[in-house]
Structure formats: C-alpha cells, structure tokens
Amino acid sequence: MVDELLTSTWEPIDPTFDTRSSLASFTQQTSSLNALQSVLAESIDRLVQHRKVVSNRIAELEQDSRRVSSKFQDGLVKPDMLLNDICAQMEDLEERFTKVSSSAVMIGDKLSSLDIERSRVLETDELMEALLALNDPSSKLTKSSNRLFNTLHDPNQLHEASRIIKKMSEFSTELSSPTIAFAVTEIERLSQTTENNLLTEFSNEQEKGNLMGMRRCAESLIEYNDKEKVADRYVWNVMCDRLANVFPSIACDSIPSTTSISSSNLEKDGCIAQLEASLVFFESLRGLAEDEGVPARYGEVMDEAIDRCDIVLKGSELRGELITKVFTSFVASFGDEYLGALLKRINFLDEQFDSFISPLQESLPTELTICQESKQKCLNKLESLIAAGLQQVLTVIEKAISQILTAHQGKGDFLGSQASMSLSSSKACQKCTEYLQPLVTLICRVLIEENCDRFLVALARSFKDLYLQHLRKFRFDPDGACMLLRDVSEYRQAFCSPSTPAAVDDIFDLLHEVANVFALPPENLGGFVREGKLATLNKQTLHHIVKRRWDYKTNADKLTASLKDAKEAKDEKST
C-alpha cells in the first residue's frame, strides 16, 4: 500500500475545498466499522485506478523518448556522413594543392633556368658582339654601342674590365675559327694591359697608403686568377725594398768569406797576415753586433707588412698564403744575410714566429707548417754553416801553427848549448802564443758556454797532436827539457779562458809529462810513465818520444826495459 501511495502523483489541495465538511463527511461516513471499510476500499480502488493512469502515462513518455532518441540518432548520422565527406574533400584538395605547389616549384625552376639561359644568351650575344668589334681593326676609330667593348677601353672602369676580359678569354678559347684570330690576339693584348694596369694601380694605392684601394685591386687580381702576381708584387715591391733600406748590406759585403781565410791562401810566413785578416773579420762583425736597432727596425718592417696584408686581404684565401710568403722571405733575407753574420741573433726568428706568425696562422695549419719549416730550414742551414765554419777554423789554425813552428823552431833549441843560455821560452813558442792568445780571446767572446768549451777542447787536442808530431823532429837533453817545460807552460797560458775546461788542463798535463820524459834518469822512466798520463798514449807514440832523448843510443836497453816493465804493469792493472 505504501509503495502504491508513493508512486501516485501528488496534487495540491484546492483552496476552495472545505476541509471541515470533508472531515465531517468522513466522520459521518465512518460512523461504523463497515462504513470505514467501505470508504477505505473505495479509496484504494481510486488509488489503484490513479496508479494505472500514471503507469500508462509513463509508458507513453518512454515510448515518446525512444522515438525522439531514434530521430536524434538518425539526425546525427547525416552530419557525421557530411563531416566524413568534408574530410575526404579536404584531403583531395590538399593533394591537389601539393601537386600544384610541386608544379609551381618546377615551373619556377624552369623559369629560373630559362632566365639564366636568357641571361647567358644575352651575355653570349653581347660577348660575341664585342668579339666581332675587337676582330675589326677599324673599330678602334669608331664609337661602338657595345657596353663590353666600351668598358674594355675605358681606363676608369679597370676593375670591371678585368672581369670582362676574363670572360672573353674563356670564351675565345672555345672558338677555333681563323676568322677571329685578330680578336684573339687583341684579347691577349688587352688581358696583359689590364693586368699591368691593375698591378700599377695596386702600386699607386700602396704608395698613397690607401688600404681600401689596395684591397680592391687585390680582389680584382685574385678574381682574375693572378694570385701569384699579387703576392709577388706585394712582397717584392714592399718587403724587399723596405728591408733593403733597413738592412746594412754594405757592412755584410765587407765581411770576408770563409774561403778568403782558408789554408790555401796562407803563405809560409803569412801567420801575421792571417791574424790581421781575422781581426778585420771580427771588427766587421762587431759593428753589426753592437747595432741593436737593426733587428728592431727589421722586425718592425715585417710586422707592418703582415698587418697591412691582414687588412688588405682580410677574408681572402690569399691572405694566409701571402703572410706565409712575407715570413718566408723575411726568414730567407734576415736569416741568410744578417743571422749568417751574427750568430747570437738566431733566437730572433723564434721570437718573431711565436709572437706574430703563430697567432695569425693558427686557423691555417698548413700555412703555419710552411712557416715553421721555413724557419727550421734557415736555422738548420745556419747551424750547418756554423759547424762547417768552426771546423774550417780549426783546420786553418792548425795549418798556421804548423807553419809558425816550422819557420821559427831551431834544431838546437832543446839542446844544452842553446837552452841553458835562455831562461825564457823558445822563439817558436813566442810566435805561436802571439797567434793563439787573440784567437782564444775571440773564441770566448763569440761562442757561449758549452760551445766555447767544446771548441777550446777540440783546439787543444788538435794542438797536442800537432805538437807531438813536431817534437819528433828534435833531440832533447835535460836542459832542453827545461826549455820544453817553459814552452808548455806558455802554451797552457795561451789557452786560458775565464773557465778553462778540465780537458784542456789534462792535455797540457800530458805535454808537461812528455817534457819530463827527457829530464828523468832511464831507470826512473818506467815508474813515471806507469803512474802518469803518459800511460794513455799508444805504445808507438811513446817510443817515438823516448827515442828523441839525447842518450837514447847509449841507454836504449835500459829505456826499453823500463818501458816494457811499465807496459806489463799497466796490462796487469787493467786485468
């Protein structure tokens, strides 16, 4: 009952309805139990009827809702179909648009090609017209309407003319007809004239200091495929002239060559002239060495040239090549000429390379390598020349000493009658020390540290070998041995330097022991040889020295036995 009541539709009470009469009526109607049951039954019937009406109404509404929903779904199908149709049409339009765009691009490319062909045809026609005008010798006397022809003969359009003549040169190479031979000749003439005019204009702008004008000429020449001439003109017209003004070539010309002081030019008594020539050589070098301004000015010129090159050819492929050419020319000139005369200036090239060339050529490893190889080639060449020169100096000194000893050493200098009368060194020793002392002083001033020590040691060894050979020509008695000791002491003094190498002292210690060989008694000679530096001499040389003793013929057996004992003791000690 409750469910049925709840499912019924509520309706508001009519305000005109009299509730009292209703209540009264209900009270009157339910005066008994049967009456109440009848009223309730009637109410229930009425409610059931009302529920049926509501249920029917709900069924109708549901049916109407399904019908409306069906119509709505049917209505959605058409827009969906329409949307699909629109999408399909859009895809079709997009595909057509893509085809149209591709066609437009193709048409644009063809139009561009046609335009290029048209320009090429017009240019070829203009070139052909100019070529025909050039082929006519009388065209120079008449004014032509051809723009190219007029530009070629206009001195105010030099840069444009260079581009035109390049095209005409390429164009004329494809034509082999003999009828245009005059035109080909005229093109070659104009080509040379234009090139010369550009180079002249480049030089004029260079003299004015107009970097922009130089840049324009350089660009035209580079475009004209004449990079080498730009480089040559820039380097040789600027660098060589300016460097020649800075570099003291006259001073270098006055420096004698190594052949001028070679041994072939030494006469028998020419040692003094040899010494004078060496002093002249040294004085000519000293003037250059003391002029600190020369390398500074030289470096400034190179730095300025590189800076100008960087400005004039900035952004050009020729820039790196030209900087390389400037530096290699600088190295060749400065290194071969100046550094060849001044050995202490070698590190100047390294300073220039590290300070200026490396930063500018850092992005161009090939050009940087060329610069580095050029510098190294120069330094290697200088080093080899220096080494060869030092070796030649040793040879010259050896020849000079040999001539002095031969000329001034008397046969009786080391025998008692002569040696006892003098408390000084021999005449030959005096002449040799007069020759050696200035040379040793010069060597210590020119060569530095280890190089100086090595050269002095080499010179001392050369002198030792030469002097031992020289002593084999003379005989010695005890008084002569004293003379020889004085000579050896003078020779040692001639080789003295601020830091005399130990090897030089060892050499003169050996010569001192050689002098003592001629003063010792025969029986003491073996022990002296065994304990001293004479043990380092070979057996044959030692025997030749001992044979020069004044008493060798009378004491030959004793001397030989003493040397034999010394030799055996030496062999036992070595084993």
Image (cartoon, rainbow, N blue to C red):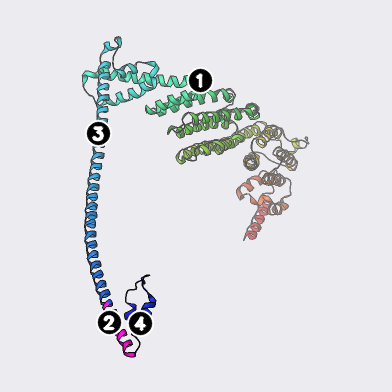
CA distance for labels 1 and 2: 133 Å
- On screen, residue 370 versus residue 571, left or right, reads left
Q: Given the image, on which type of amino acid does mark 4 rest?
A: Phe
CA distance for labels 1 and 4: 139 Å
Q: Which residue is mark 2?
A: 45
Please tell me whether mark 1 or mark 4 is closer to you in this view.
Answer: 4
Q: Specify few, some or many for label 1: CA neighbours under 10 Å numbering under 14, 14-19, or 20 or more.
A: few
The picture quadrant where one finds residue 193 is: top left
What label sits on residue 266 in the rendered view? none
Q: Which residue is mark 3?
A: 111
User: On screen, 467 above or below 7?
Assistant: above
Q: Is residue 2 magenta?
A: no
Question: Which is more N-terminal, label 2 or label 4?
Answer: 4
Please tell me whether mark 3 or mark 1 is closer to you in this view.
Answer: 3
Please tell me whether mark 1 or mark 2 is closer to you in this view.
Answer: 2
Counting from the top left corner in percent of width and height, residue 453 is at 65, 42
What label sits on residue 26 in the rendered view? 4
- SS at circle 3: helix
Question: Which is more N-terminal, label 3 or label 4?
Answer: 4
CA distance for labels 2 and 3: 97 Å
The residue that appears at 25% across and 77% down in the rendered structure is 52
Q: Which residue is mark 1?
A: 207
Q: Is residue 39 magenta?
A: yes
